[in-house]
Amino acid sequence: MPDNSLFVAGLTGVTAIAASSLASWLTSRGNARAARLQVDATTEAQRREGTRQTRRAAYLNLIEQAQVVADGLRGVDGLSITECEAALAAHRDRHQQLRRAVTLVDLEGPSAVQVAASNLLIMSGTLATALAAMAENAGRENRREFQETLRAYIRLITPLVDAAAAALNER
């Protein structure tokens, strides 16, 4: 009998050690997996926030440049031909800054914002053409066409702002 109890006690001890080791091993694997998942989730959240902040800066710069273009052309209607030529030169500088801002938005995306930005840039080029026509001949027709083009340009700012806001609110 004493031999059986020693055997049972030894078997019980070995079983307890084996079960404890197995449980410890399984727990450590589960903890390692949970830690990996947490790191992956944190990394992804940081990447998304970084992308959002980069896009936000690009969108704000573009909206600011678009507004600078509009503000620079609001008082052009009553200018002389010489003043129109100076306004055209200033507009070309603002147009180049707008082009750089649009290029940055093209890199950041998404496509809805890219399309709105491209439309704005195209209309800014059309404004330059209308202003150049006014600088050559400040007649009533050229002034009317310039004002219509400026109003169309200003109307394009709102869809850009809306597309940018929607892109920033995406998850």
Image: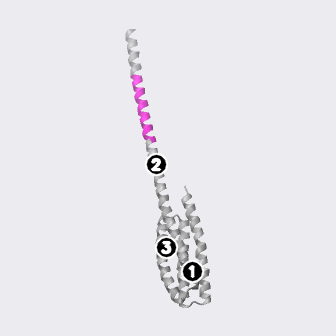
Q: Choose the circle earlier in sequence order: 3 or 1.
A: 1
Q: Choose the circle earlier in sequence order: 3 or 2.
A: 2
In the rendered view, tell whether residue 15 sits above or below residue 158. above
> Which residue position is annotated with label 1?
75
Give, as a three-letter code, the residue at label 3.
Leu
Mark 3 vs mark 2: in front: 3
In the rendered view, tell whether residue 124 sits above or below residue 31. below
**In the image, residue 151 lies in the stretch drawn in magenta:** no
Give the extent of the magenta segment.
Answer: 14-34
Residue 73 position, x and y percent, is 55, 79
Lateral position of residue 171 relative to residue 21, left or right: right
Alpha carbon of mark 3 to alpha carbon of mark 2: how far? 36 Å
Q: Which quadrant is home to the C terminus?
A: bottom right
- Label total for image: 3
Alpha carbon of mark 1 to alpha carbon of mark 2: how far? 51 Å
Give, as a three-letter code, the residue at label 2.
Thr
Checking the image for residue 42, the label placed there is 2
